[in-house]
Image (cartoon, rainbow, N blue to C red):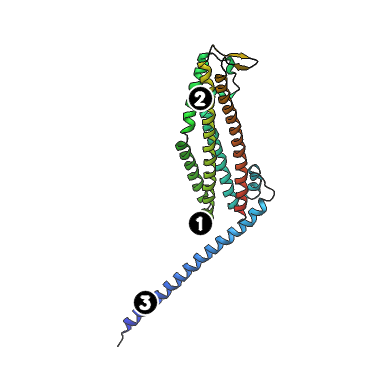
Amino acid sequence: METYSGQRTNMRTRVVLSLLFIFVIACFGLVYFVGDLARYQEAISAKETEAALRGVNNPEQLDRALKQYPSNSILKLIALANKESIEIDAITQRLLNEVQPKGLSKPIDLGAFSRSELDALRRDLQTAQSHAATFEPGYIALIKAERDKIENDARSLKVGNDTLAKFMAMIDGQDTEMMGLTSKMFAARAQYYNAYEKCAALLVTEFGIYKVENGQFVFPFQSTADSYNRAAAATADGVKRIAELNGERATLRHSQFDRWKTFAER
């Protein structure tokens, strides 16, 4: 026979279990509501972003859209991607400037150089060639640091995990593209410096033998002239290749921005 106290204990147990069940159901409901609300907010944000980016055709116009929709998380992500692109472009240019010999920042008249000046130019070109060939480890470290900053900033926007994952995948793709192009740019610089150094080396060897007439080098032997002309042609090809890659760099930035607009319309 069950006692009164036992009945009370069983009743309390049933009440506690009932309350616990209600609490668990409420938690699941809250989680579902929050997740559903987040999805709803992202859907609204995506539509708003699509409207904001209508007529925005280059990165410079992005500020206008952000001012119009300052709380839009997708626009903020695109702005972060654009910021990283600008930072990496600046890093790339700084490293290219550091590699380039100071004397090459303006046109050079090799025909007016003394032997000691030609020797100094050769040393500078050899140093520049070496730096251009070994730029990669330091460059990759700088890119990774920028990537980590962008990820931290993106997480602070509290976007969904799927959105963040897609965003970072596109950032990684953007970085890979820029690193590939930068590698080509430094390789082109190294080839250019190598060709230019050959011109200077030949002039050092032939100093006092060749003449300069109407801005042209005149050598006593055709074989020497042919060697110089080959090096000079390779130098000119290097200048052309560098200019082409600079053009690709500008084109890449715009194509990346177009892809970010597609990301906003997902």
Q: On the rendered structure, is 102 left or right of 214?
A: left
| Label 2, label 1: how far apart the Cα atoms are | 49 Å
Q: Is residue 183 above or below residue 198?
A: below
Q: Quadrant of residue 221?
A: top right
Kindly identify the amino acid type of the residue bearing the numbered disc 1: Asn
- Mark 2 and 1 residues: CB-CB less than 8 Å, in contact? no
What residue is rendered at 56% in x and 62% in y? 37
For this rendering, which residue is in front, 190 or 253?
190
Kindly identify the amino acid type of the residue bearing the numbered disc 2: Leu
Name the residue that disc number 2 marks.
125
Where residue 154 appears, x then y in whole percent?
Answer: 52, 49
Residue reaching furthest right? 55
Dot 3 or dot 2, earlier in sequence: 3
| Label 3, label 2: how far apart the Cα atoms are | 86 Å
For this rendering, which residue is in front, 209 or 132?
209
What residue is rendered at 49% in x and 41% in y? 143
Name the residue that disc number 1 marks.
161
Quadrant into which the C terminus falls? bottom right
| Numbered disc 1: secondary structure | helix
Count residues near mark 3 (Cα–Cα under 10 Å), then give few for <14, some for 14-19, many for 20+: few
Dot 3 or dot 1, earlier in sequence: 3
Count residues near mark 2 (Cα–Cα under 10 Å), then give few for <14, some for 14-19, many for 20+: many
Name the residue that disc number 3 marks.
13
Dot 2 or dot 1, earlier in sequence: 2
